[in-house]
Amino acid sequence: MAKTDSNPTQNSRRSFLKQTGSAVAGGSFLAGSSFLITGTKASGAIDGANDRVRIAVAGLNGRGQAHIAGWAKAPNVELAYVADPAGKVLAKRMDSLASRAEGKLTTRGIGDIRQALDDPTVDAISIATPNHWHSLMTIWGAQAGKHVYVEKPMSHDIAEGRVVVEAQKKYGVVIQHGTQRRSNAGVAGLHEALKSGKLPRLKIAYGYCCKPRNGIGHEPISDPPADLNWEHWKGPAVIDQYHANYVPYDWHWFWETGNGDLNNQGTHQLDVARWAIDDDQTHPTRTMAIGSRFQWDDQGVTPNTMFAMAEYPNGQMVFFNVRNVNYEGYERQVFNEYYLEDGSIITGEGNYKILRPGASKAEPLKLDQGHVTPGGNWNAFIAAVRAGDPSMANGNVMDAHYGCVLGHIMNNSYRLGTEVPFSETASDFGGNEDAIEHFGRLHNVMSEGVGISGSDAKYQLGPMLTFNADTERFEGERADEANGLVKDANNPGYEVPSVDAV
Ligand SMILES: NC(=O)C1=CN([C@@H]2O[C@H](COP(=O)(O)OP(=O)(O)OC[C@H]3O[C@@H](n4cnc5c(N)ncnc54)[C@H](OP(=O)(O)O)[C@@H]3O)[C@@H](O)[C@H]2O)C=CC1
Ligand SMILES: O=C1CO[C@H](CO)[C@@H](O)[C@@H]1O
């Protein structure tokens, strides 16, 4: 890991950042209050009375603010650093912190998270950068002995996710994925009931990521803004030239930096769907996707419409819908559904209803709460850090890896797709009747709701890919092309190490 020339330990003074009107007494932190501690503790060791956790947040524009607020509410957590490569974003966040600080603000604003990694008194980092940075920064964090809270998706491609897994094993740090539904004991309870046989066996776990969005237009190639360290923003991502649609947020819709909505919002629902699959299953072995970027005629390239399916070796399936196009009467659907072998359908999120075969109305499904580390996503991470126990993470590194790869291989099928006429019989989905029926519903929304029609309209139909769950490589038809998508190219100085070199 490259070293920086800063002296991050120079601020040895503690001070406190006031977030609300509550009071901090005697220089100590009142557990459960809404203060954010800033400053530096004398030692990085987390023990006994000095169990303060010092954390550095990377990525400050959108989700990074939720991270700061989340750590502020966690007892005895100290915001040591905030990092962002854009000078204006960093200055704005620092101003905001300073305006709420009691006394001198000692949180350090930095452009490069490696300054915080070099500080032995930092215990953990929390990553809210664009997706292409998630794995590399997590790996750097593990190598530096820091615990890591990393936003979803933990990986931008299949191979780097595996490196994170191996880094976690080697360095033993806590890694928690930003899939906060993993902290929901109601969701855990349903999945435990499904797996223990208290409910009929799960056949299809279905995720929906259907929230309306708009196109992003076209931005010309230009110089990056003067305050932005563009080389560092790109980091591992190979991007030819800057345009203003990358920064901020709309990087989601370019494959070099994002993963489309399937592995954006959809990561939450993909993760829940996979969590419901039997515990002895790792990756699906067959997957395919069909979709398009309808309606917008913009610069983004990832699909705004998608139906994808994945089949696990035990026959259980994950189905997934993405539907971002906007139209009058749009039905927002961001949730999961469970189709059981006896024909029942379960819906809800932590508070479930079941529609039994032949019944006209769904009935409430009363279940025991499942096992999660209590306290919500932020507190669970801090509890795991204090205990030094990676298994306490709500959404650990393996959960993250399997959930993200599920989305990556669906996206890979889509990316290898060919154009076919816009039709409800665009694919036979390997003969899967359930998939044919569910794709038909999405197709109807596109034709009747969105009004897509005519010979110019096309779907991009991806091949049925075969994935070897042991080697994490594709096999069989189109395998060479699919394996070309397993690992992204990286820029010099920002290479994701190999599994052997981690
Ligand atoms: N769990 C959840 O519910 C949610 C999770 N997320 C996840 O959070 C992540 C961030 O999303 P969002 O905030 O919407 O995206 P934004 O683009 O709005 O913000 C990302 C920030 O990261 C900064 N950044 C880029 N590279 C680096 C780097 N090397 N070091 C530090 N900061 C960097 C960006 O810099 P710049 O200032 O130049 O743009 C920007 O400020 C995404 O991965 C997303 O999936 C988002 C929303 C909710
Ligand atoms: O639009 C968004 C808001 O909710 C999602 C939840 O993780 C985000 O990631 C996404 O970018």
Image (cartoon, grey):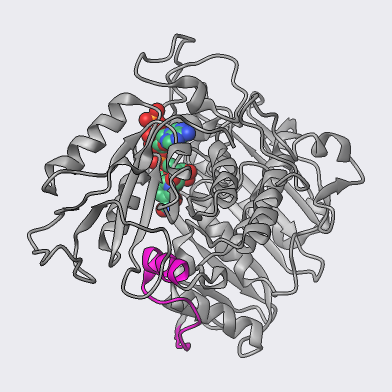
Rendered-image quadrant of the N terminus? top right
Figure quadrant of residue 310: bottom right
Q: Position of residue 283 (x, y in %)?
A: 74, 60
**103 magenta-colored:** no
Can you see residue 296? no
The segment highlighted magenta reads 364-386
Figure quadrant of residue 379: bottom left
- The residue at the point 7 percent across, 59 percent down is 21
Q: Residue furthest right?
A: 476
Q: Quadrant of ligand 1?
A: top left
Left or right of residue 171, residue 248 in this image: left
464, 50: nearer the viewer: 50
State how many labels appear. Answer: 0
278, 360: nearer the viewer: 278
Q: Is residue 179 above or below residue 486?
A: below
Q: Position of residue 237 (x, y in %)?
A: 60, 28
Q: Position of residue 488 (x, y in %)?
A: 69, 33
Can you see residue 320? yes
Q: Position of residue 434 (x, y in %)?
A: 71, 62
150, 248: nearer the viewer: 150
